[in-house]
Image (cartoon, rainbow, N blue to C red):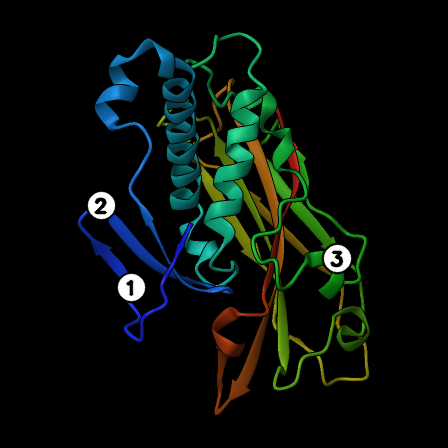
Amino acid sequence: MARQESLVKFKGKIGDLSFYKTKDGFQARMKGGPSKEQINSDPRFQRTKENGTEFGRAANVSKKLREQLRVVLNQNSDPRFPNRLTGLMNRILRADDVNGRGDRQVISQNLGQLTGLECNANAKLSEVLFLRSRPIYDSATATTSLELPEMIAKNQVKMLTGATHVQVQIVAAEFDAQNAEANSLAMARSSYLDVGRSDASPAESLAMQLDPAPQPDSAILLLMGLSYSQFVNGGYYPLSNGAYNALTFVQVLMP
């Protein structure tokens, strides 16, 4: 690896040379590796081609799910969530034991690996919401429900400076990577719970139904989250634009 010793610090590319900075200083290297044409045509790179094809497929499935959940991910995920989801989708794809290398798919029966995935690594649900209640899905009616007990909110959630209220949120999503029509989504939020009160808020029931009804080969993804807000002049505003909000895949029901 070449190291730059001159007073001029280059960054970027000049011809076949790439200049970059590391913890050891400014360095340079030549462009290398097989070309795209070689990978596509040379039998020696068959494994590389297969790996690239499958990773691209996993990335597309990850994008499909993120687009379906966009409305809830907007203020409940961190910037690296897309990378984590793509990496997990790639592992789910490799769990396909039916199709051969290069043709493996993200199939619904393997989506259970999504359970426990945190959308915001900076705010894990178990570390900000201290309740055992979790959403329950009724496949007969395609209904998801959550029972919130009577509680003193400030004792059941992690307190954050500036936050005056919190909301508990549940999400149900129908998902099948092989079927673009499998995209039902339902959401429900609790009332705004005042974290400054010392008396208990009343028990609350959340319920929602997937419409249209999920298709037989779809998985049902259940997510649960907590959102912080600040009450100012009659309005509720997301605290720090949702930087501390939690959202977790709490259960996946496979077909």
The answer to which of 110 and 27 lies nearer the viewer is 27
Residue identified by numbered label 1:
11
Q: Is residue 178 above or below residue 203?
A: above
| Label 1 – label 3 distance at C-alpha | 43 Å
Q: Quadrant of the C terminus?
A: top right
Q: Does residue 142 show up?
A: no
Kindly identify the amino acid type of the residue bearing the numbered disc 2.
Asp
Residue at the (44%, 30%) spot, across then down: 58
Measured from the top left, where is residue 168 in percent x and y?
A: 64, 62
Frontmost residue, 162 versus 204: 162
User: Residue most toward the left?
Assistant: 15
C-alpha gap between disc 3 and disc 2: 49 Å
The residue sitting at 81% across, 81% down in the picture is: 199
Labelled pair 3, 2 in contact (Cβ < 8 Å): no
Q: How many marks?
A: 3
Q: CA distance from mark 2 to mark 1?
A: 13 Å
Q: Where 158 sits versus 110, above or below?
A: below
Q: Earlier in the sequence, mark 1 or mark 3?
A: 1
Q: Secondary structure at mark 1?
A: loop
N-term-proximal mark, 2 vs 1: 1
Q: Position of residue 15 (x, y in %)?
A: 17, 49
**First in sequence: mark 3 or mark 2?**
2
Q: Which residue is under mark 2?
A: 16
Which amino acid type is marked by label 1?
Lys
Q: Please, what is the three-letter code of the amino acid marked with disc 3? A: Ser
Residue identified by numbered label 3 = 126
Residue drawn at the location 49% of the way across and 55% of the way down: 80
Apparent side of residue 100 relative to residue 6 in the rendered image (left or right): right
Q: Secondary structure at mark 2?
A: loop
Res 132 label: none
Residue at 61 percent across and 24 percent down: it is: 254
